[in-house]
Image (cartoon, rainbow, N blue to C red):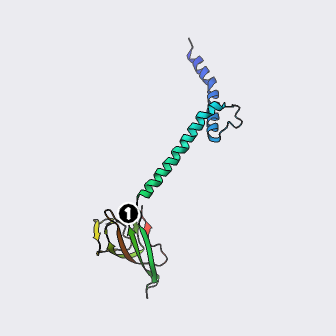
Amino acid sequence: MRTLSQDIESRTNHYPYWTHHRRVAVTYFLWGSSRGSGLHLAPTRGLPVKLIRATIVLTIVIGAAIARQDQRGQPEAVRSIFERHNQSDVPGKEIVIGTAALPKGAIIGFHTHPGDEIGYVIRGTLVLKTRGRPDRILHAGQTFFNPRGAIHSLQAPDSAGLEVSIWIVDKGAPLATPIR
């Protein structure tokens, strides 16, 4: 029967052996060879490593494709800026006119503007979400107003929508700043 000290000694003696083989296995997996590790792997032992490597690569590729599919699954709004003009007799301000076309299910995430926005829904039904206020359902023909700095979002949950907006903003500032 072995004593406790003999058991500990035998495990300690084998530790470097297993450490070495673990390092060789990781090196072989990463680089496809043992690269001078002193251990030469037979071709039949490399087959499982290649299979594991191929499985991991395939999993990463499929995961990336699924993530890309999820991103494409969410329709995106298309924004168009038509014109920008300096505001008469008001230095540092400009007037911008543009549209946002929202396919069904599209969401323009929460954001702010460096000035006031007034909008008109041309087509469809949109939902205007403004932090600190109840949601507003906007139908074609209705208007909305967002004061400077209002954190808001626009959605087209049930049907495609189109709106036109006019902004009076600080000249040179980004038209919208996303809020996370």
In the foreground, 41 or 95: 41
Residue located farthest toward the top when viewing the structure as drawn: 1
* The N terminus lies in quadrant: top right
User: Residue 173's x, y, as percent?
Assistant: 48, 74
61 to 13, vertically: above or below: below
**Residue 32 % position (x, y):** 65, 39
Answer yes or no: is residue 21 visible.
no
Tag 1: residue type?
Answer: Ala
Q: How many marks do you count on the picture? A: 1
Q: What residue did someone put label 1 on?
A: 106
Which percent across, then down, holds residue 125?
A: 30, 68
Circle 1 packing at 10 Å, graded few (<14), some (14-19), many (20+), is many
In the rendered structure, the answer to whether residue 8 lies left or right of residue 98 reads right
Residue 44 image position (x, y, % from top left)? 63, 30
Residue lying at 44% horizontally and 78% vertically, measured from the top left:
82
The quadrant in which residue 11 appears is top right
Tell which of 48 and 89 is nearer to you: 48
Vertical position of residue 6 compared to residue 131: above or below: above
Q: Which quarter of the figure has residue 101?
A: bottom left
| Viewer-closest of 109 and 68 | 68
Tell me the quarter of the image containing the C terminus: bottom left
- On screen, residue 132 versus residue 49, left or right, reads left
Helix, strand or loop at disc 1?
loop
Query: Can residue 137 be seen by looking at this rendering?
Result: yes
Q: Quadrant of residue 22?
A: top right
Residue drawn 47% across the image and 79% down it: 171
